[in-house]
Image: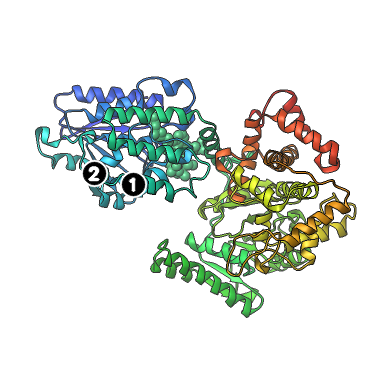
Amino acid sequence: MSKVTTSKISGVAVLTLDNAPVNGLGLALRTALNKAFRDAMEDAEVTAIVLIGAGRMFSAGADISEFGTPNSMKPPSLPEIINMIEAAERPIVAAIHGNALGGGLELALGCHYRVAQAGANLGLPEVSLGIIPGAGGTQRLPRVIAVERALDVIVSGKPLKAEKAKELGLVDFLADGDLVEAAVKFCGSLPEGNGALRPTRAREDNLGPAREKPDIFEGYRKSMARRARGLDAPYAAVECVESCLFKEFDDGLQFERDTFKRLVASDQSRALRHAFFVERAATKIDGLPKDTAKQNIEYAAVVGCGTMGVGIAMNFANAGIPVTVLETKDEFLQKGLGVIRKNYAASVAKGRISQDEMDGRMSLISGIADFNQLGEPDVVIEAVFEKMDVKKQLFNELDGLMPAKTILATNTSTLDVNEIASATGRPEKVIGTHFFSPANVMRLQENVRGYKTSDETISTIMALAKKLGKVGVLVGVCDGFVGNRMLHAYTRQANFLLEEGALPQEVDKAIFNFGFPMGPFAMGDLAGLDVGWLIRKARNKDKPNNLRYSPIADRICEKGRFGQKTSAGWYLYKEGSRAPVPDPEIEQLILDVSEELGFDRRAIGEQEIVERCIYTMINEGAKILTEGISQRPGDIDTVWLHGYGFPRQRGGPMFYADSVGLKQVYDVISTLYDKYGDWLEPAPLLRDLAEAGKGFGDL
Ligand code: 3H9
């Protein structure tokens, strides 16, 4: 069946793009559109053409999975089709609903007019894939809306709502009823003859004023330096928009096309496209049919009103789900509710939400200090102190009090979900929901399946993650699950680097330069050092001959230095500042430990720091895969991209390993193993893949 269907209404040809699920502009759709458009133009009775999308949206743009394949190069190309549409001698109208993104919006920009349904999204998100709009977006959008606004849309990648797009001039008419009807009626309102033609390439009105202020581009580059650190595409996008002011239209298009081709073949774009696809793949659970029954979550409860509980409760309110927070002491409850109110008020002050929205969300949150008042929640999320006996007792109590339908979830970051479930008579309804701090901001939700967790519970909690705007990744039970288990390996290695010769600021700088928002020591200070200290002490008590780790972190904690909250940890913090300042006292402590352990300190370069920290993490990831704790390498990447700030332009640790080559990773790990033994044993999976010349992507 053709990917474009044509119908005729009152002399207007309506061409419907029909390529589920998102009308991606792959070769088959391009071929069909090219033909349908030419056929319509040959029909002398056709007075105008409307382009519209079938299903949920107009179009999400180019078919990303086609990039780098022969089909992406086969004609007709999207730029050719758009040029043809723009040059048509009858008015062409795009009728937009759902999304017009990337190539989808570029197609609409080639049309003479745009009619959009209220609430539709119009955007050019290409930079988030490490590319720039490659079908005229950087040349046409600044001809339709003010150049500064076009820069915002192209460089941020964030879509505009149709209402805003109308205000800016990108949309000509907002439709609130039937879209086809509105678009056909719009065609009827246009003047007859050539007066109705409005090729975007000929629109110069916006360009003149911008040519008078060429420094907007320099200013823009400066203002985006922080958010675009280490990225190529946002800078290339600014350059293309700038070129549209000073080049002839066709030369500008060619410049954009060349830039697009260069970027689409880059490592950054490959990594960012990988991130796009693995995030979506993570929502699919092996062996769990798509139609597995799900419970509706209409009312939730959160036990514990500390930092995590507060953030988790906000997630529910943000998603429109009523939530009750429970604290044993009214004082803690009031404090927690106060923090929620303060967080929302800060969002209002920054213009992120309106006062009405804040009031609406606050009205969905209630607080109680008595279990018996919880009612009948569909899910209870426990976010209390990280101690097994406390959690088990709580789950036992909840099991007795809650109706049979209630899912009991734990926000533990390390503890055994099976043991927690064993304290209940409903282990099939017990699951881990590990949120990351601050839970109302961080997007990762590591969902931990116990041995007995039912398919229905998994399916419900994965769907809940989506509803809460989180990226849900299903993992299995082990110490630290996927994220923290790999984090422990990484930070343990970072500590060994200190014993051998590096200083915290040197390690942090190398990891920052690699692309993380901060290095392991600055991150430790931010998260608080006391939690890790408690965990290490508990572990050593249970298993006295546990894996060796450096004593430096414990000695810092023994001094009462727990990080930013005590204004001192690995670094010092001036009052009211979060900027880490290296501390000579800590440097001396590190030198003393090196001496005690018999290390002859040496200078350690950035490359060695990065290799040792990141490869150690990858080795642990390989063990996690073999143990079946994670379904696939892409899930591990997703955990690290959304929970720990792994640089997205490197695709996640497992993708990065493949791009470096597993032989290189294996060789470094083997050398470290010879030196340290025990936990650094190379994962057999890493060894096998490296020896076979394969990567994790081949699994
Ligand atoms: C571009 O246009 C380049 C041009 O400038 C130049 C060309 C020369 N391609 O996200 P969902 C799949 S670059 C291929 O779960 P939602 C997705 O993988 C493109 N596949 O739905 C998933 O597959 P599966 C610029 C795509 O409702 C399924 O569709 N455009 C594409 O939560 C459903 O997706 C973008 O960057 C695609 N373009 O969100 C937009 N888009 O079911 C990218 C989606 O097998 N897309 N898929 O897992 C999105 O942002 C979201 O998908 C969207 C819908 C908001 C549209």
Residues at circles 2 and 1 in contact by the CB criterion of under 8 Å: no
Q: What is the x, y in percent for residue 239?
A: 38, 37
Residue highlighted by disc 2: 206
Q: Image height check: is 543 above or below 217?
A: below
Residue 640 versus residue 47 in the image, above or below: below
Name the quadrant of the N terminus.
Answer: top left
The mark closer to the camera, 2 or 1, is 1
Q: How many marks?
A: 2
Secondary structure of the residue carrying numbered label 1: helix
Q: Can you tell me whether the CB of the residue at mark 2 lies under 8 Å from the nearest atom of ligand 1? A: no
Where is residue 433, by image quadrant?
bottom right
Quadrant position of residue 403: bottom right
Q: Residue at the location (54% across, 32% down)?
A: 267
Local crowd at mark 2 within 10 Å, few (<14), some, or many (≥20)?
some
> On the picture, is 38 further left or further right than 443?
left
Instruction: Sort mark 1 into few (<14), some (14-19) or many (20+) by Cα contacts within 10 Å.
Output: few
Q: Quadrant of the C terminus?
A: top right
Badge 1 amino acid: Asp
The answer to which of 572 and 229 lies nearer the viewer is: 572
Tag 1 residue: 215
Is residue 294 shown above or below 692? below
Scheme of colours in the image: rainbow
Instruction: State how far apart marks 2 and 1 are (Cα).
Output: 16 Å
